[in-house]
Image (cartoon, rainbow, N blue to C red):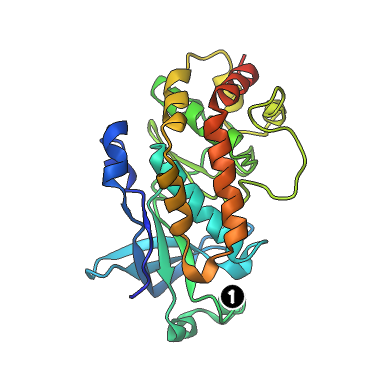
Amino acid sequence: MTLRLASICLPLTVLCECSEQSLGALLTMLRTLEAIQFIKEVGSGRTQPIVVAAETDDGDVIEVVLKFSSSCDMGTNSLSVEVIAACLAGTLSLPIPEPFIVSIPADWRECLPPMIRARYSEFDNLAFGSRLVWPQWPAWAATNRLTPRMVQTAAEILAFDGFIENVDRRDGNPNCLVSGDELRIFDHELAFPRGLIGLKPWALGGMGSFTEHGRHIFRRELVARQIDHFVIRSKWAALRNEDIDAYGEAVPFGWRDDEFIADILTKIRQIRDNIDGCVTELDRILT
């Protein structure tokens, strides 16, 4: 596999052990895998993802959930959002399954069941993948409750979704898995919405929609809970311009829409530069 990507984020387990000062020096590549075997359909999801076995350059086989551009509303731009959001989440030490770029050999498509093969374009030679962690990790349900150990992580996830305007972690579509006190979040293609005129997340009322019933899976559980706002503020304020640039460079060449990517990176810098207002608005919706 010859696809080369820019330096971005380490797996979560490594990120969590890094100090803020050393994080930038330890950034590494988003790994590229090659699809080798179809396993099954996920069975849900607007983009109709599938589970495959994929191989690393070293011959290790990993089960991965794949999302193809031809099933996304914005095509390859949707997958670019997934890459950038995964890199950002990794830098912020948020609990995401390990992300991958997965190459699709031309002859591999013939191994897919006909109905599944028909969903995807012959031009889908790359896909966005996330390491499979379910069924061992079931989806977050409305009956779940945050344990004390989950509260800060859940608050940082809510902040992440609010700041990047991701409205797709809601009751009925949680895009979050849970195991004991651990959470894993995924599916961020609707973040950084384009062409919408509205309040910025650092403005008064900028996250007001999250106060509506069921609009975010954690908001109700976090109201009046003890949250370390300083940690949230510090992680976002520490984002460096070179790291943010690397998120865009991590997008594969075949997916690149430079104007589209530049707009997203500008939004990330605006959030960082207005993080005090963002945290104030987060505090307001949780009071």
Provide residue 52's location: percent of width, then percent of height.
42, 68
Image quadrant assignment for residue 173: top right
Q: Residue at x 41, y 19 (%)?
A: 148
Looking at the rendered structure, the kind of residue marked 1 is Tyr
Q: Residue at x 48, y 29 (%)?
A: 156
Residue 44 seen in render? no
Residue 280 vertical position relative to residue 14 in the rendered view, above or below? above
Provide residue 58's location: percent of width, then percent of height.
22, 68
Provide residue 10's location: percent of width, then percent of height.
32, 48
Give whichever of 112, 193 is nearer the camera: 193
Residue 91 seen in render? yes
Give whichever of 43, 125 is nearer the camera: 125
Provide residue 183's location: percent of width, then percent of height.
43, 37
Image quadrant assignment for residue 96: top left
Mark 1 lies on residue = 120
Seen in the image, is 22 located left or right of residue 241? Answer: left
Image quadrant assignment for residue 12: top left
Q: Residue at x 43, y 37 (%)?
A: 239
Instruction: Give SS at disc 1.
Output: loop
Residue 191 vertical position relative to residue 276 in the rendered view, above or below? below
Give whichever of 136, 254 is nearer the camera: 254
Residue 66 vertical position relative to residue 146 in the rendered view, above or below? below
How many numbered discs sit on the rendered protein? 1
Give whichever of 54, 57 is nearer the camera: 57
- Which quadrant does the N terminus fall into? bottom left
The residue carrying pointer 1 sits among few (fewer than 14), some (14 to 19) or many (20 or more) residues within 10 Å by Cα, namely some
Residue 34 vertical position relative to residue 204 in the rendered view, above or below? below
Q: Residue at x 36, y 49 (%)?
A: 9
